[in-house]
Amino acid sequence: MTRHVIIGTGIAGYTAAETLRTMDRGAEIVLVSDDPYGFYSRPGLAYYLTGEIPEKQLFLFSKKGKLNLDVEHLKGLVTQIDPSSHTININTSGKVAYDRLLLATGASGVPLDVPGATLQGLVKMDDLQDTRKILSMVRSTKAAVVVGGGVVAIELVEGLVARGVKVHYLLRVATGFGRMFSAKLNPAWSSDLLLMMRSLFTIIPRSPRSLASAAGLRGFAPPPAKLCNVTW
């Protein structure tokens, strides 16, 4: 009997487990994750942040309706993978052997490498715990700064605006959505994106030379408008 170990309990991990069970009814399947909430819709976090859905709707399967995959769940953080012995080490349960191993951990936010990046009040939105923290903070927050050029940054901006927070969005022009703002690079996308963004922001046509010039050394000084194109 083949033992499949899957690290990660997001949609990729569960889809892999479902596929493996369909292909081999007798296989042993182990799902490993340190996420205390198990399987839920991470894309749905954006809608939870805006208030469009309640938290319970993130969990796609109730206890009665949960997929009957006949898998073993191990909660804990994988601290080591040893391909030579076909084992992984979990901080809560020690060594676990595998015949085949799948990494389905997904992506996570990269911390900023700038002065002040570890100050209290800085957040990310990778999982349910992060989103709960943001929601607890917005109750007493009047203004926020979002830095990033990806989809999650846009979702954060949308969610914070929906919660009544004034948002200052720093967008690096060289990457991500910043490229789409250039009509020379992609006229069609640039036009559509600008229409969408203008519904949320006032746009500054010229950008500061660096993040440091926008943020300052002692802390963030809000720009006169909500969206800044930033190069660094």
Image (cartoon, grey):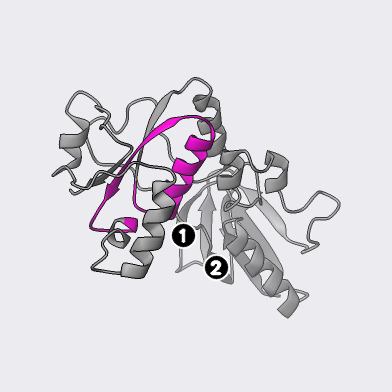
Residue 176 image point, x, y percent: 33, 58
Name the residue at the right extreme.
64
Queried whether the magenta region covers residue 123, the answer comes back as: no
Q: Which mark is residue 198?
A: none
175 lies above or below 209: below
Image quarter where the N terminus lies is: bottom right
In this rendering, which labeled residue sits more in front, label 1 or label 2? Answer: 2
Image coordinates for residue 41, horizontal then vertical, percent: 63, 52
Q: Secondary structure at mark 2?
A: strand
Q: Identify the residue at horizontal 48%, vertical 36% (top origin).
A: 161
For disc 1, the neighbor class at 10 Å (few under 14, some 14 to 19, many from 20) is: some
Q: Which residue is mark 2?
A: 101
Magenta segment includes 154: yes
Residue at the limit of the structure toward the top, as seen here: 140
What residue type is disc 2 on?
Answer: Leu
Observer-nearest of 4 and 44: 44
Residue at image coords 78%, 61%: 67
Q: Secondary structure at mark 1?
A: strand
Nearest to the observer: residue 9 or residue 113: 113
Query: Disc 1 marks which residue?
Result: 81
User: Marks 2 and 1: in contact by CB < 8 Å?
Assistant: yes
Q: CA distance from mark 1 to mark 2?
A: 10 Å
Which stretch did the figure color magenta?
148-177
Above-or-below relation of 61 to 24? above
Residue 160's place in the image compared with 231, above or below, is: above
